[in-house]
Image (cartoon, rainbow, N blue to C red):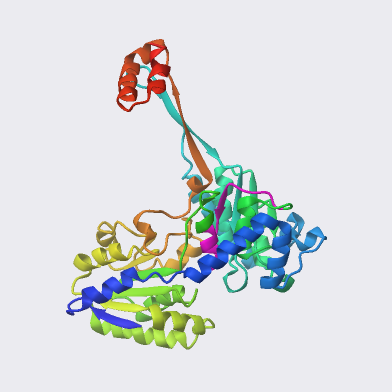
């Protein structure tokens, strides 16, 4: 962890380094992923069999159950949940569904002053693929956050790919697949799973959109395959920016910072405060909590390598501009008047207002999607929504009179652009 003070002469240089630090995949990952994609595209299931054994030590055999997890297994996993776990997942699913149903767009159909009929119609994509990580990052909450918006959008075929290292299944993920209405679950992970979803293999049919979190290889595969399929975003390591004054309990803010640090050693946690003594108190509280949590190894590496505490003179005047430059995935405003700061922030994946709104509540049960842009991409992109699983088709209808009104202008524009057939297609109707 490094402490920066806004009044220091070298603050701008140091802060710019933080802003520009990508913490994402390198050229070696890009090259490896390119080879994997090519292998899957050429060899299909044979490539998946080879790569799944190599990376996950799981044998994909002639037996379909080695490839695919049935809906009955997902239902059984849900039925076996402890009552409090089932209630928690059901509560999360209900709130996520309610929030995303409010995002559904409406079709447009109207006539303008020249009696030209104009509009747009929304349709869901036919098939969507959801990547669900295995191992340390096997989170049922992420499956719900991806599956429910897809189903709300109207996706007919919802496919999950997930690694099962050494054949081990994650029952919580299977239970979430049942709640989310997933149609297919395939026991394939890594960049090879993304390639299979994009191009299709003998067993796995291709999809139109791929969403879901993953490691650097999964993220790079999505980046390389964008255009073959739609994707939600190229996601990097998790980020949290906490803007807090001295009225907060240091233990609360320490937990907030480590809530992202424990995700991955490359995650980033930043505190901006206007009190140097309070900054020190939070740093001490982080050290205490790091000694207690089971994820301390990962969280400590993240905090020591990528954590920052920034001390400014005035939170309202200085913090919003710094926040916009960071364009962080999560921004938490633990102050008396969060709205005053929020009104000045343009770039953030999701904002959490007030002392009693920890970022972690958004990860599970608040309702808005927790799949959010990282790596300063909040400057130009948004979190996952139903619109990621839909596309808009515009339509136009003219009659003889309306063509007579606007057609001559089209002819003129076509002629000055040197496209005589364009001009002719309008002119012959006038």
Query: As rendered, which of 174 and 416 lies closer to the eye?
Result: 416
The quadrant holding residue 357 is: bottom left
Q: How many marks?
A: 0
The x and y percentages for residue 285 are 38, 85
**Residue 251 in sight here:** yes
Where's the N terminus, which quadrant? Answer: bottom left
The x and y percentages for residue 307 are 37, 78
**Residue 169 in sight here:** no
The x and y percentages for residue 283 are 35, 84
Q: Residue at x 65, y 63 (%)?
A: 162
- Vertically, is 419 above or below 53? above
- Vertically, is 297 above or below 352? below
Query: As rendered, which of 144 and 357 lies closer to the eye?
Result: 144
Q: Which residues are magenta?
A: 204-222
Q: Residue at x 48, y 56 (%)?
A: 367
Q: Residue at x 42, y 72 (%)?
A: 23
The quadrant holding residue 354 is: bottom left
Where's the C terminus, which quadrant? Answer: top left
- Vertically, is 382 above or below 66? above
The quadrant holding residue 309 is: bottom left
Give the side of residue 425 with respect to residue 171, left or right.
left
Q: Residue at x 44, y 24 (%)?
A: 396
Residue 217 among magenta residues: yes
Residue 131 among magenta residues: no
Residue found at the very far right of the displayed protein: 63
């Amino acid at each position: 962890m490094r402490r920066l003070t806004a009044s220091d002469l070298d603050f701008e240089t140091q802060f710019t380094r933080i802003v520009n630090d990508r913490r994402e995949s390198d050229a070696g990952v890009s090259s490896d992923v390119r080879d994997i994609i090519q292998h899957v595209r050429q060899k299909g299931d044979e490539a998946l069999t080879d790569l799944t054994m190599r990376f996950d030590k799981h044998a994909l055999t002639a037996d379909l159950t080695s490839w695919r997890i049935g809906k009955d297994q997902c239902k059984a996993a849900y039925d076996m949940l402890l009552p409090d776990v089932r209630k928690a997942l059901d509560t999360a699913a209900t709130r996520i569904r309610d929030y995303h149903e409010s995002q559904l767009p409406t079709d447009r159909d109207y006539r303008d002053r020249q009696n030209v009929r104009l509009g747009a119609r929304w349709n869901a994509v036919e098939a969507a693929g959801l990547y669900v990580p295995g191992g340390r990052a096997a989170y049922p909450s992420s499956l719900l956050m991806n599956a429910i918006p897809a189903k709300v959008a109207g996706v007919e075929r919802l496919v999950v790919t997930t690694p099962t290292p050494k054949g081990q299944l994650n029952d919580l993920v299977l239970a979430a697949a049942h709640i989310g209405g997933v149609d297919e679950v395939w026991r394939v992970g890594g960049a090879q799973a993304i390639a299979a979803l994009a191009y299709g293999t003998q067993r796995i049919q291709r999809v139109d959109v791929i969403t879901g979190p993953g490691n650097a290889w999964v993220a790079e595969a999505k980046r390389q395959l964008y255009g073959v399929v739609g994707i939600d975003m190229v996601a990097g390591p998790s980020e949290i920016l906490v803007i807090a004054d001295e009225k907060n309990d240091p233990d609360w803010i320490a937990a907030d910072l480590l809530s992202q640090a424990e995700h991955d050693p490359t995650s980033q946690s930043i505190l901006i405060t206007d009190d140097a003594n309070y900054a020190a108190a939070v740093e001490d509280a982080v050290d205490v909590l790091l000694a207690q949590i089971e994820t301390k190894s990962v969280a400590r590496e993240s905090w020591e390598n990528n954590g920052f505490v920034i001390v400014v003179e005035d939170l309202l005047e200085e913090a919003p501009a710094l926040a916009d430059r960071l364009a962080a995935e999560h921004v938490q405003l633990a102050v008396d008047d969060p709205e005053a700061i929020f009104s000045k922030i343009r770039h953030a994946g999701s904002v959490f207002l007030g002392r009693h709104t920890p970022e972690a509540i958004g990860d599970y049960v608040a309702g808005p999607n927790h799949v959010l842009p990282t790596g300063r991409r909040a400057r130009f992109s948004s979190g996952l929504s139903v619109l990621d699983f839909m596309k808009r088709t515009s339509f136009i209808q003219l009659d003889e009179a309306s063509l007579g009104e606007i057609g001559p202008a089209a002819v003129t524009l076509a002629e000055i652009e040197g496209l005589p057939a364009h001009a002719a297609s309008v002119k012959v109707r006038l």
